Image (tube, grey):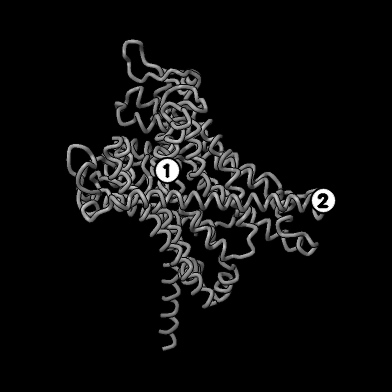
Amino acid sequence: MQHVRVALFSTCVSMRKAVDSIGSFAIAAFAAVALLSLAFVVYFIVREALPLFETVTVQDFLLETRWMPVDFGTGTSFGIFNFIAATVAVSFLALAFAVLIGIGTAVFLASSESHAVRSFAYPFIDLLAGVPSVVYGFVGLLVVVRLFMKAGVTSGLCVLGAAIVLAVMLLPFLISACSDSLLSERNRYLTAAQTLGISRWSAMATIILPAATRNILLSLVLAMGRAMGETMAVMMVIGNANVFPALLGKSETIPAVIALEMGTAVAGSDHYHALFAAGMVLMLILLAINLLVAFLRNSLAQKSGKAANIGGHGGKKAGVVVRIWAIVSIAVTFAAILFLFGYIFWQGASTISWEMLTQPPRGMVLGEEGGIAPAIAGSLAFTGCAVVLGGIPAIACALFVTFFVRSDRAAGAIRIAMQCMAGIPSIILGLFAYSFLVRDLGWGRCVLSASVALAVMVTPFIEVRAEKAFSELPKSLVEASYALGCSRLHAIRTIVLPACQGELVRGIILGACYALGATAPLLFTGGVAFAGMPTDLMEPAMALPLHLYLLVAQGATSLDTAFGTAFVMMALILLSNALATAYAHAVSRKWRALR
């Protein structure tokens, strides 16, 4: 009998080791999938871009201003200098506007003594991040452009208007990145400063904020990359004219020209390859920015912030100034959130009806009759597939970095890859899916093709939040499980995932909201103007953000339906964010109670 027990015990141990090995291999494999996505995107964009340079020199492509993709008797020309200039100009202006409010809001949140204030504020700021870019463009057209027209700008469409809209889009990214840096420095210095008799706001102004300057500057560089890749909002407000950018004049960015012309470019033509080459230039610029940030972050030593007269009159005056700046900034941020949601809900509420939510569109003009039911179902199909395809590799990659990678250098390399993937514009991901899935694999325009592009887009978004949740888990819990003889996978399954499930679910839902509002990847991969309810992943489908863009493009006759479509998207985002936040808080309270 004793021999039987020993044999059974040995068998159980062997089976557990086999299961652990399989589980660990699966985590590593999914993490590899997430990382290889970046290489695939880069390869296919470069592959489709290089044939252009057999007929056009790199110098002419980058420095010439004439863009004439179709030969009307004067020959073709492919110069993207104006597009590059417009992309940089709009991004710099937007960043300049966003920095003042974004860092001020981050200072307010980091200086708050109450954790409840931050817990209340962050979900609302996440709402700004979840608002679809096409909704920003829609509101920009109806509000910002009209204000410029009243101010005397002929059409209202201009570089400055696009920069203002883009600045609001950058706020949640800047607030999140800068507040993390400020909180870290606050935890290091605030207690010691207050022990020396320095007030909280004076310490924030003269010690904490200067100490966080380097990380804040790195966040600004990353934000610049995010701004350069934006497509829909800028495209809808900037006017899209191939001229050198002027503050109150029209212009056109690289993402905009790709989105507007890819649908008419003949596959394999110079025009087709030129659009991929423009995308390659943008992608390489953004990858270089991300690699530069990673290099600076690793090489620059942190310096403690110092200031003259820390405890004196100068420190007190600086504290007052920073306090006023922070309060005004948080007020402006919340005003932007309330205006965006209030404006759409106020204008769209009257157009919502049971018929609109349950019927397909009808009539010769898009949106003139019927409803948006296929667009709602299509968006849910695109989003669901993207979250499944991107969420699993993202969480696996976060687990791999946190619990399996032993080398700090290897972990840093993986984080850099995720950072670079996060910096790839959505329009570039659409080009990748079009080149690889729609054309090479022959999938055609379908839900699955678009979902893969969306999955690559949300993977780094979910991975960063998952890794943060795992790293914030008390190490003593995991180490205690190891000491008791538990395997790494057993600890992950029984401790890590249950403890972090609230934040994981919240990250996945926020990633779903991000995918729900994406328009650019759908333009030539799976989104269409008219389609029935989606029943097959290999067929195209309607989508709410694309439907809204097409309605806006039709003009005033479709505005009622456009407001209704925007209302539905914003309601879905608001509801999803509320449910995700409530669930995360409930799980957090339950876990703290168990501990």
Amino acid, disc 1: Tyr
Residue that numbered label 1 is attached to: 136
Which of the marked residues, 1 or 2, is nearer the chain's N terminus? Answer: 1
Above or below residue 59? Residue 199 is: below
Tag 1–tag 2 contact (CB < 8 Å): no
User: In which image quadrant can residue 551 be found?
Assistant: top left
Residue drawn at x 27%, y 40% as measured from the top left: 558
Amino acid, disc 2: Asn
Residue 525 on image: x %, y %: 31, 40
Residue 354 on image: x %, y %: 23, 56
Residue drawn at x 26%, y 43% as measured from the top left: 446
Q: Is residue 112 visible?
A: yes
Cα separation between marks 1 and 2: 44 Å
In what quadrant of the picture does the C terminus appear? bottom right
User: In which image quadrant can residue 384 be found?
Assistant: bottom left
Residue that numbered label 2 is attached to: 309
Residue 485 on image: x %, y %: 54, 74
The residue closer to the viewer here, 199 or 397, is 199
